[in-house]
Image: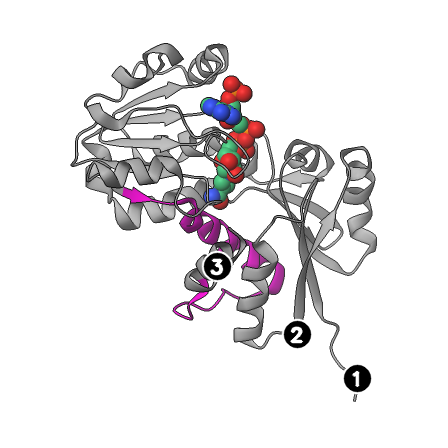
Amino acid sequence: MSQPIAKIAGVCGWPVHHSISPKLHTYWLRAAKINGAYTMFAVHPHEANYAFKSLKRTTITGLNVTIPLKSQAYEAADEVTPDAQKLGVCNILYKSGERLIGHNTDVEGFAAPLIEQVGHRFILNNTVVIIGAGGAARAVLGALLQVGAPEIIILNRTDERAENLAANVNIPSLYARPWADRNQAIFGAGLVINASAAGMKGNPGLDLDLENMSPDGWVYDLVYTPIETPLLKQAKKHGIKTIGGLDMLIAQARPSYKLFFGEHPPRGIGAREMLINYLRSQQ
Ligand code: NAP
């Protein structure tokens, strides 16, 4: 009797060897006993367009796309979903019949832990500060606008990028403040989100003093390597509640897995603990 063809998916980027997505998807696949595999593809930006266009001629069901290929994935898609269109970048490419579809799960991935842990009501009653103005910050902003955050302040090391991001949305309750004012800007904020690359392994920590922040507030750091970033450590020292980037990583991977392998990944099987142990072993 012939075996059904295994479903193959993966993550592509340049570099990509640091990605923990293969660990997570493989863990889910094994637990669900699915005949499939999830691997990594190092794709140089010069080759990305060719690689994406060739996907349709392979048995790969879909790809997660990471830095620096997200804009190229958007351009290569035959069709993009509204979630990808809002951000102008794709973190997923998958095949649907003869078409290559570009999608983005970062908004959903950011929002899920936020709603679960902080709750809708808190967000509706507090000022939010976003740090960063890149792709991740756009996803964060999209989610906060969907939830209905009443006041959003954007801060970015390069002021002009924060101003441009705020001007793109153009609503009075959303505005940029100069980077030089960052320690004052968080005064009175209920939620501070680090959507910048500061604090990531190999980068300097985020230069932000949480002294002025209310201990009733929350700090959400999208960075997940290391698990406990300098910003999260500082927040804990001040008694501020925290969410780390690993929760977003898992939440954005869940819909990817469904698209690639046809069913929701299993819950309650210790995937988060497995990743924490893995990341700690790499420190
Ligand atoms: P990006 O488009 O390259 O943007 C990087 C941002 O970080 C820019 O705003 C940049 O400011 C800022 N930045 C870099 N180094 C900084 C420093 N030392 N101090 C202050 N700001 C600094 O990257 P991205 O895609 O938005 O990703 C940002 C971070 O989010 C990354 O660490 C990424 O790993 C993380 N992320 C996590 C998840 C998850 O699932 N947990 C998902 C997506 C992204 P300038 O404009 O001044 O350069």
Q: In front: 194, or 268?
A: 194
Amino acid residing under circle 3 = Leu
Marks 3 and 2, Cα distance to the nearest angstrom?
22 Å
Q: Is residue 246 above or below residue 121?
A: below
Where residue 95 appears, as percent x and y from the top left, is: 70, 52
Q: Is residue 272 above or below residue 127?
A: below
User: Magenta region: which residues?
Assistant: 242-271
Instruction: Name the residue at 49% across, 45% down.
Output: 225
Q: Secondary structure at mark 2?
A: loop
- Quarter of image, res 73: top right
Q: Is residue 40 left or right of residue 283?
A: right
Instruction: Provide the secondary structure element on which disc 1 rests.
Output: loop
Which amino acid is tagged 1? Ser
Picture coordinates of residue 180, whole percent (x, y): 37, 10
Q: For marks 2 and 1, give the one nearer the viewer.
A: 2
Task: Report crowding for label 2: few under 14, some 14 to 19, many 20 or more residues within 10 A (C-alpha).
Answer: some
Q: Residues within 10 Å of mark 1 (few under 14, many from 20)?
A: few
Q: Nearer the viewer, mark 1 or mark 3?
A: 3
The tag earlier along the polypeptide, 1 or 3, is 1
For discs 3 and 2, the disc positioned in front in the rendered view:
3
Magenta span has 27? no
Q: Which residue is mark 3?
A: 275
- x, y (%) of residue 147? 31, 36
Position of 195 relative to 100 (above/below): above
Mark linked to residue 2: 1
Residue at the location (27% across, 49% down)? Answer: 117
9 vs 32: above or below: above
Q: Quadrant of the N terminus?
A: bottom right
User: Which residue carries the number 2 mark?
Assistant: 35
